[in-house]
Image (tube, grey):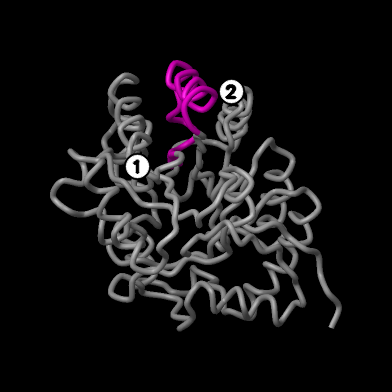
Amino acid sequence: MTVRATYKTYAQFLAEKFPGNGKIQKIGVSLGTSCPNRDGTLGTGGCAYCNNSSFSPDYIHAKDAIRNIGRTLEKGKNFFGRKYSDMRFVAYFQSYTNTHGDTVSNLMQCYRQAASVRDVVGVIIGTRPDCLPDALLHELGEMNRNECPVILEFGAESSHNATLSAVNRCHTWETTVDAVTRASNEDLSVGLHFIMGLPGESRDMMLETVRRAVNLPIDTLKFHQLQIIRGTRFANEYEEDPTKFNLFTPESYISLCRDIIDLVAPTGIAIERFVSQAPDNLLVAPRWGLKNYQFVNLLNSKTGSKVFSAQAGYHNG
């Protein structure tokens, strides 16, 4: 079998970003924010595919998750500490839009509260590219330069504006390019998230998105296959007409991932993940019966891909 390009893993990125001893683990933190296309700022109803319960770990739903970030992080540390005794942690503001719906001062207070917890060495902030005002961006740049590493993770989903409109994203690809550029100018590390297989997108369109992304000043990429999740607009549409969706099989998605690797590997941009695994009680389709690590093992075995490893880095999923 031909050995394909070697790509940089997220574990290696973490090891480089946070040098030192101890594995690195992200811990999810909730701010209780909403999204501008849910709360009426830009629209209502949310993205057509989105149910936040499908990617929010159980431990962030405790009563004090919103009001006491420190206690939430301690619970997360205890949860992961059962597996590894020597760990360092990154606070991951994941659910919804974590730069939206509050003042710059209040948001910065939350990020700093997380960074002050023992063994927390940095913060990752998940947000949308249209929710990053210059004042907040400057404060995050100062925090990154003077206090601890700050990483921004933008949900971009696609580079095609027709797709973004169809799934009710309420922003354009040009908005993503602008946000990434401004964040990079503040010396912040940036990651982009994309969904492969959105309705109307061909394989060539998906790969064009990857080509456009790797030409931006980013550090990481996160992909996952489209999943139909209960409680979403797509779930209703799938029930009415499943043929509207051309959902991946593991084999067809491996073929796409092979081409993604070839595009990303030469750039040195890390690939955080290829797939997502929604909770069984929320997942409508497709049902692969594979955990994330099992898919990666299958990808490597089927394509001959080789990945860098990093003993100082760890990421669960």
Q: Residue furthest top?
A: 135
Amino acid of disc 2: Glu
Q: Residue furthest right?
A: 2
Residue 4 in magenta stretch: no
Q: Nearer the viewer, residue 106 or 173?
A: 106
Q: Which residues fall within the magenta stretch?
A: 123-148
Image coordinates of residue 84 in percent, x first then y, are 42, 65
Q: Residue furthest left?
A: 63
Q: Is residue 113 left or right of residue 238?
A: left
Which residue is labeled 2 in the image?
A: 186
Q: Nearer the viewer, residue 252 or 147?
A: 147
- Identify the residue at horizontal 51%, vertical 28% (top origin): 144
Q: Is residue 138 above or below residue 253?
A: above
Image coordinates of residue 175 in percent, x first then y, are 55, 31
Q: Is residue 197 above or below residue 96?
A: below
Image coordinates of residue 96 in percent, x first then y, are 34, 44
Q: Residues within 10 Å of mark 1 (few under 14, many from 20)?
A: few
Residue 133 in magenta stretch: yes
Amino acid of disc 1: Arg
- Identify the residue at horizontal 32%, vertical 39% (top origin): 117
Helix or strand or loop: what does disc 1 sit on? Answer: loop
For residue 8, which quarter of the picture? bottom right
Label placed on residue 118: 1
Q: Which numbered disc, 1 or 2, marks the residue that appears first in the sequence?
A: 1
Q: Is residue 9 left or right of residue 170?
A: right
Alpha carbon distance from label 1 to label 2 = 26 Å
For residue 124, which quarter of the picture? top left
Q: Is residue 74 left or right of residue 242?
A: left
Q: Nearer the viewer, residue 256 or 18?
A: 18
